[in-house]
Amino acid sequence: MTKLVRWQENPDEIVLEEVEMFHLESMNERSLWIGVYTQGKKIYHLNIHADGDKLRYYWSDETLD
């Protein structure tokens, strides 16, 4: 079973176990998109964007039911 570890205890750190595929794309010079596909058939997306002097990130569960 795939577990999302330490997300609630430390929200600035994401640790995944049982990852089948990690896919990173540079969308432009300020944005990265990351797809994480687990052995348990879960799909997560992480978007990271530089906004001036701030780094913004968005984490979503994109698993198809």
Image: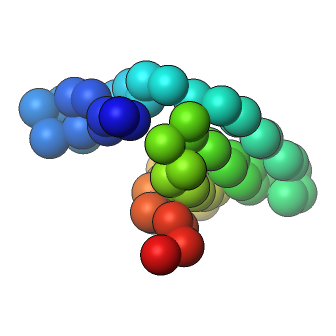
* Residue 50 seen in the current view: no
Residue 11: x and y, percent?
Answer: 24, 39
Q: Residue furthest left?
A: 9
x%, y% of residue 52?
60, 56
Relative side of 64 to 22, left or right: left
Which residue is pictured at 67% across the width and 49% down the height? 35
Q: Is residue 23 above or below residue 56?
A: above
| Number of dots carrying numbers | 0
* Camera-side residue of 44 and 65: 65
Where's the N terminus, which quadrant? top left
- The residue nearer to you, when weighing 41 against 56, is 41
Query: In the image, is 43 to the left or to the right of 60?
Result: right
Residue 20, picture quadrant:
top right
Query: Seen in the image, is 25 located left or right of residue 47?
Result: right
The structure residue drawn at horizontal position 22% and vertical position 28%, both measured from the top left corner, is 6
Furthest-bottom residue in this view? 65
- Residue depicted at x 11% and y 32%: 9
Which sits in the foreground, 8 or 1? 1
Quarter occupied by residue 39: top right
Looking at the picture, the colour scheme in use is rainbow
Q: Position of residue 44 (x, y in %)?
A: 53, 54
Does residue 49 appear in this view?
A: yes
In percent of the image, x 77 and y 41: which residue is there?
23
Relative horizontal placement of residue 7, taking residue 20 as reference (left or right): left
